[in-house]
Image: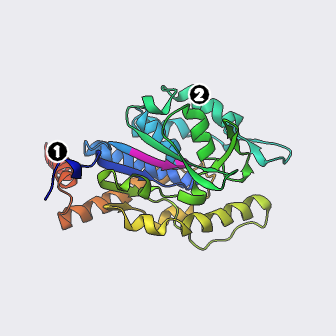
Amino acid sequence: MTGETDRKAYKLGLALSGGGAKGFAHIGVFKMLEECALMPDIIAGTSVGALMGTLFADGYTADEIKELFTGREFSEFAQLQLPKAGLFDSKRFRYFLKRHLRTKNIEDLRIPIVIMATDLDNGESHEFRSGPIVEAVTASCSIPIIFSPVVINGVHYVDGGLFHNFPVSIIRDVCDKVIGVNVSPLVSQKYKQTIFHIAERSYHYMFRANTLEDREMCDVLIEAEEFGLYKTFDLENVETITNIGYAAAGRAFEKVLRENKFETLVKAITTKKNRALQP
């Protein structure tokens, strides 16, 4: 028997994984959602997923988000420092966020979002659902060793991927359906024997390991092996990675159409296709 108590708080949730520059694929998924006129009711994001999800929740279109990163270099977001708590300082990244975000506090965004970070002092996952956006997103993106931890109210926070790189479980129970975008598959490729690249590779293994259960919780899972071909800080292939994300979303949505199990999404895809056929 169903009743009022069985209703979920949100119809559609969108979970966005971490993965560095591979997260530009999220932009392609946003583009597909826009074309289907299908917007999430809540977003959960880790690291770059938190960054992209926050911009989307702040009212930016997919094309506008892509424009923000096209033609930029890593040095515009991070400055090398004498190793203290991290190889890079994130002041430039904070400045980028302050300059471009239209909303200051998480709770005021157009779409509710859960930003995942890791409480380094207490060894546990932390969900930011309110408070200043800039600090929360910076914390969520701060890969240990590579970036210094972010101190918020006296607590040191780092990348949310240590515990929840693919935060489907964070919103699963409050959503009727969840679309998940996992941009962190691990493929075999050569890497440099430097502290920077060894740390990057090590975290990839850790992030991959804690995504397995979350992948199974998605109603629609969007991922592609091609994501793994790009480096964490690759800002030279924004367009290409975005297009890979768009294509991966298209394949996932076509599967939904064939299986006919997700009524709202099926209607949205069908409407999109019908529009495309109109002269």
Res. 186 mark: none
| Residue 32 place in picture, x, y as percent | 32, 48
| Residue 247 visible to an observer of this rendering | no
Q: Nearer the viewer, mark 1 or mark 2?
A: 2
Residue 218 or residue 153, whichever sits in front? 153
Residue at the location (54% across, 33% down)?
133
Overall secondary structure of the magenta stretch?
strand
Query: Residue flagged by tag 1: what amino acid is it?
Result: Arg
Tell me where residue 168 sits by quadrant. Answer: bottom left
Which residue is denoted by mark 1 in the rendering? 275
- Magenta segment boundaries in residue numbering: 43-48
Asked if residue 13 is among those painted magenta in the image, a careful observer would answer no
**Where, quadrant-wise, is the C terminus in this rendering?**
top left
Which percent across, then down, holds residue 221? 36, 62
Q: Is residue 56 above or below residue 126?
A: above
Using a 10 Å C-alpha cutoff, classify the residue at mark 2 as few (fewer than 14 neighbours), some (14 to 19) or many (20 or more).
some
Earlier in the chain: of badge 1 and badge 2, it is: 2
Q: Which image quarter holds the N terminus?
A: bottom left
- Numbered disc total: 2
Q: Visible in this render: residue 83?
A: yes
122 left or right, relative to 99:
right
Helix, strand or loop under label 1: helix
Where is residue 145? Give x, y as percent.
75, 54
Residue designated by label 2 = 98
Q: Residue at x 73, y 52 (%)?
A: 146
Choose between 22 and 120: the one closer to the eye. Answer: 120
Q: CA distance from mark 1 to mark 2?
A: 38 Å
Q: Is residue 47 magenta?
A: yes
Among the 4 quarters of the image, the one containing residue 19: bottom right
Name the foreground residue: 19 vs 144.
144
User: In the rendered image of this protein, does residue 124 appear above or below residue 75?
Assistant: below
The structure residue drawn at horizontal position 74% and vertical position 45%, both measured from the top left corner, is 148
